[in-house]
Image (cartoon, grey):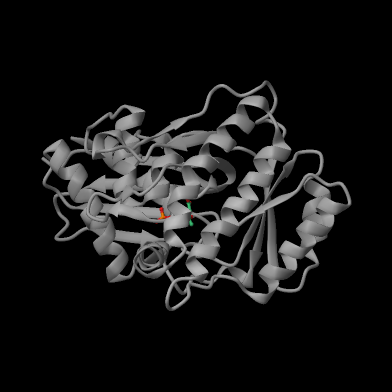
C-alpha cells in the first residue's frame, strides 16, 4: 500500500548564481551558490506509484508533457525507485502558478516538489539534507528549494556533500522586510536556451568562464557577511553585480548565450533610475529575459507600479520570502494488491 502524495515547493532566485557543472552525470555544481526562496512562485506536484501503468506519466499544467520532459522525470524517478525498492511506474501531476521553463526557476520548485512527493509516495522519509541532494540530481537549483528563506548551496567535493541548507543567523526582521519584485518580460514564453545546455556551453567556450569560477567564492563570502549583518545595500549591490558577471560569461560564449530582450534593458535602466532617486532596489536575472528586483516590503508597491508600465513587461509579481518544501496531502492510501 503506497500513499498518493502531494507536495508544494517554492521557486528560489539566486543572489549568487550557480552557472556551470563539474560533473554532468551527478549534476554537481562547479561552485556554491546562495538564494532566496519566494512564496509567490510555487509548484504543487502529486505522485502516485501505480502497478497498472506501463510507463511513467506526466501531466504538466493540465497538459500531457512532451516526451523529453517525461524522460527527464523518469530518470529522476528511477533514483527514487532504486532507493525505495519500488519498481513501479508513477503518475505525476504538476502545476506551477507561474510560467514554466521561461527563466522563472520552475525547475527549482518543480524538482524540489517532485523529490518530496515521490520519496513519500514511495514510502521513504528522507532528512532535508538527503532530500536536497536528491533534488539536485533533477536540477542544481532545486537543491535550494527544499528550504525556505536564505539558502546556501555547497559545491561539495562528492555527491554526499553537495547539498543546500538554510542560512539561520540573520538579524531579526531582515528576512521579513525583504521582497522580490518579478518583472515578467515577453509573456513568460518558454526560453530558447535551457540553463543546462547554456551553462555547459558557457563552460566549454567562454573565455570569461574561468573568471566567473574565481569570482563566485568571493561573492559568496560577501553575500554571507551582508546577510549576517542585515546589510541590504551590500547584499543587493553584490547580487546585481554577480548576476551581471554570470551573464557576461554567457554573453562571451561562442556563439553567445543572450537571454536579454530590449525590455530587459529598459527594466534594468528603470531599476538604476529608482536607485538613484533613493529607492532600495537591486536587479538580478537568470536564464531568461525577466528581471527580479530585490527590495524592501515598504518599497515593493512603488517599485511594482514603476515597472508595470514599462514596454514589454507583461506581468509584475511581488513575492515575500517563502517557506521550505512541504507535503500538503498524503491522505489517500491506494492498495495495488
Ligand atoms: O538548476 P538549473 O539547471 O535550472 O540552473 C539554474 C541556473 C540559474 O537560474 C541561472 C542560476 C541559479 O543559481 O539559479
In the picture, measured across the screen, residue 198 lies left or right of residue 292, that is left
Q: Position of residue 177 (x, y in %)?
A: 72, 33
Is 333 drawn above or below residue 78 in the view shown? above
The quadrant where residue 61 appears:
bottom left
Please identify the quadrant where the C terminus is shown.
top left
Which residue occupies the foreground of this view, 44 or 50?
Answer: 44
Residue 316, position as x, y percentages in the image: 70, 58
Residue 324 shown left or right of residue 158 in the figure = right
Image point (89%, 52%), residue name: 277
Asked whether residue 208 appears in the rendered view, the answer is yes
Query: Which residue sits at x=56%, y=57%?
Result: 245
Q: Is residue 334 left or right of residue 179?
A: left
Q: Residue furthest bottom?
A: 255
Residue 285 vs residue 126, the one in the foreground: 285
Quarter of the picture containing the N terminus is top left
Quarter holding residue 265: bottom right
Number of marks present in the image shown: 0
On the image, the x and y values in percent for residue 180 come to 66, 46
Residue at (65, 31) in percent of width and height: 175
Residue at x-position 47% and y-position 35%:
152
Up-down relation of residue 10 to residue 245 (above or below): above
Q: Quadrant of ligand 1?
A: bottom left
Q: Locate residue 312, reporting x and y percent.
A: 70, 73
Residue nearest the observer in this picture, 186 or 29: 29
Amino acid at each position: 500500500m503506497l500513499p498518493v502524495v502531494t507536495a508544494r515547493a517554492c521557486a528560489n532566485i539566486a543572489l549568487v548564481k550557480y552557472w556551470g557543472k563539474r560533473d554532468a552525470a551527478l549534476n554537481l555544481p562547479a561552485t556554491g551558490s546562495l538564494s532566496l526562496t519566494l512564496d509567490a512562485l510555487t509548484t504543487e506536484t502529486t505522485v502516485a506509484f501505480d502497478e497498472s501503468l506501463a510507463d511513467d506519466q506526466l501531466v504538466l499544467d493540465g497538459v500531457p508533457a512532451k516526451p523529453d520532459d517525461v524522460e527527464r522525470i523518469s530518470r529522476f524517478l528511477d533514483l527514487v525507485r532504486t532507493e525505495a525498492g519500488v519498481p513501479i511506474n508513477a503518475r505525476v501531476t504538476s502545476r506551477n502558478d507561474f510560467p514554466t521553463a521561461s527563466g522563472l526557476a520552475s525547475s527549482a520548485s518543480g524538482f524540489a516538489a517532485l523529490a518530496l512527493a515521490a520519496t513519500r509516495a514511495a514510502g521513504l522519509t528522507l532528512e532535508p539534507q538527503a532530500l536536497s541532494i536528491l533534488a539536485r540530481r533533477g536540477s542544481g537549483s532545486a537543491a535550494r528549494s527544499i528550504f525556505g528563506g536564505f539558502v546556501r548551496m555547497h559545491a561539495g567535493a562528492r555527491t554526499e556533500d553537495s547539498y543546500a541548507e538554510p542560512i539561520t543567523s540573520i538579524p531579526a526582521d531582515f528576512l521579513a522586510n525583504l521582497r522580490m519584485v518579478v518583472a515578467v518580460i515577453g509573456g513568460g514564453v518558454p526560453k530558447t536556451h535551457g540553463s543546462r545546455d547554456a551553462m555547459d556551453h558557457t563552460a566549454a567556450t567562454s573565455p570569461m568562464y574561468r573568471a566567473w569560477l574565481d569570482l563566485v567564492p568571493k561573492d559568496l563570502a560577501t553575500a554571507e557577511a551582508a546577510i549576517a549583518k542585515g546589510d541590504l545595500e551590500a547584499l543587493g549591490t553584490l547580487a546585481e553585480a554577480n548576476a551581471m558577471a554570470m551573464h557576461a560569461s554567457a554573453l562571451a560564449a561562442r556563439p553567445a548565450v543572450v537571454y536579454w530582450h530590449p525590455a530587459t534593458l529598459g527594466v534594468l535602466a528603470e531599476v538604476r533610475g529608482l536607485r538613484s532617486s533613493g529607492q532600495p532596489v537591486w536587479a538580478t536575472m537568470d536564464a531568461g529575459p525577466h528581471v527580479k528586483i530585490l527590495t524592501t516590503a515598504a518599497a515593493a508597491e512603488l517599485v511594482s507600479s514603476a515597472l508595470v508600465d514599462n514596454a514589454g513587461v507583461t506581468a509584475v509579481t511581488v513575492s515575500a520570502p517563502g517557506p521550505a518544501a512541504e507535503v500538503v496531502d498524503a491522505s489517500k492510501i491506494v492498495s495495488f494488491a
